[in-house]
Image (cartoon, rainbow, N blue to C red):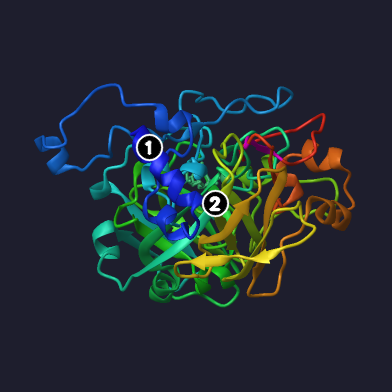
Amino acid sequence: MSGKQTSRRGFLKSGGAVAGLVAAPPALGLGGAAAAAQGPEVFDNNDLESVLYGRRSRFVTTTREVEGRSHYQTPRVRPNPQRPSARTPLADLVGTITPTPLHFTTQHYYGIPDINPAEHSLMIEGLVDRPLVFTLDELRRFPFVSRAYFLECIGNRPNPRATTVTGTHGRMGCSEWTGVPLSVLLDEVGVQAGASWIIAEGADGGRHTKSVPLAKALDDVLVAYGQNGEPVRPDHGFPLRLVVPGFEGIYNVKWLKRIKLVDKPYLSFQEHSRFLTPDPKTQRDSYDFGPNSVITRPSGEQQLQTSGMHVISGLAWSGGGRVSRVEVSTDGGATYREAELAGPVLPKAHTRFFLPWRWDGGEAVLQSRCLDERGQLQPTEAEYARYWNLTRGQLYGTIQSQLGYCNWIQPWKVAADGKVTNGLEPTDVVVDVHA
Ligand SMILES: Nc1nc2c(c(=O)[nH]1)N[C@H]1C(S)=C(S)[C@@H](COP(=O)(O)O)O[C@H]1N2
Ligand SMILES: [Mo]
């Protein structure tokens, strides 16, 4: 093992090693802790259980990260603390699709329902010609699409207190969703003149409800039954969920059971409880999320072992469509270079980028910025604050959902000893609510 390690480093030092690095990642749990940790037991890769339902190597131990308490002044709103939310371990992932068991999950109030798909149905009613109830079986008889879309909670925000990229951006994932375009079902029921919004409702105890503009519903919204090639898992809405590409996560109603066509948006509980703000200049709803990106490697708590060739890699995405360009800076934003986009660049989906980088062993500040196909450029923290006329205290002391989409740039600082830490200036108060 150490022999291999040494020879790989020798190879890297001798240069021209970028391809080697990509072809032979040391382990998915990059650097130190995760790579060193091992599963609790030795299991047999050849047993029937592994044949029937594949499992990962016992040397890969990455898990989701359970959400801690919100800021101490934030009242405990969840009566079901046994079922916390959890973040995606972004630093340990490669590519663009989030493995479903590692996809973040946000849970409001009532836990995960145990739904028998044979007894579940979707009702579409309200301002329609023919109210209809669709069983799962009936939905499977309609034309469908499979599309990769990111799903992100408004609770994601660069955070000076967070030590890892999971802490700053772990409330997101990207899946291939399969389902019936809502436009197809709306065609079936016949939308009446005067309808301009839909209300979507879930079957969880809290009856999670969200208003969605009809124009969006007719555009690219899906009634999804598949996620990454299998039925949507219970965490994520089994057996049916709404997928509202590029919009705030809260729109993506899980355990979807009812859609009502209405003539105006309704302020549901979820929409007023933590989403209203006294300042009319700040937005209540985040429709299309703006351009965003973050470096996942190297990122907080990772350790560069040696100077020389590295690859800086991360994710870029935008609710406004495709990522058109990602730029990476190694000097805290003084200069930027264009990164390469690895893999397909799909609208409203995570796009993996990388930039080969020769580390000279000195201090560096790594950060990325995304330009999307609408020409929108990801702002710095200072630009964001100036635009909304907010102090740094307000930027981090306000609940995320009351600020709007927090897409400013997240820098990572590399010290001379190779240790990577959060590059944002410290601040006194950080409110962190997983909305
Ligand atoms: N029925 C229902 N749908 C829901 C929620 C919920 O609590 N109940 N949470 C919403 C929020 S705030 C987010 S960010 C996403 C999270 O989806 P995920 O758990 O599949 O990652 O689901 C949304 N849909
Ligand atoms: Mo959310």
Disc 2 under 8 Å from ligand 1? The reply is no
Is 179 displayed left or right of 395 in the figure?
A: left
Is 97 displayed left or right of 75 in the figure?
A: left
Instruction: Tell me the residue that label 2 is attached to.
Output: 310
> Does residue 295 belong to the magenta stretch?
no
Residue name at image x 56 percent, y 37 percent:
302
Sequence-earlier tag: 1 or 2: 1
Is 24 displayed left or right of 311 in the figure?
A: left
Residue name at image x 29 percent, y 57 percent:
229
Q: Is residue 93 visible?
A: no
Magenta: main secondary structure equals strand
Residue 175 horizontal/vertical position (percent): 42, 56
- Helix, strand or loop under label 1: loop
Numbered disc total: 2
Which quarter of the picture shows residue 97?
A: bottom left
In front of the other: 201 or 242: 242
Residue 322 horizontal/vertical position (percent): 56, 71
Q: Amino acid at mark 1?
A: Pro
Residue name at image x 52 percent, y 75 percent:
192
Which quarter of the picture shows residue 324?
A: bottom right
| Image position of 290 with respect to 309: above or below | below
Instruction: Tell me the residue that label 1 is attached to.
Output: 113
> Does residue 419 belong to the magenta stretch?
yes
Q: Amino acid at mark 2?
A: His
Residue bounds of the magenta highlight: 418-422
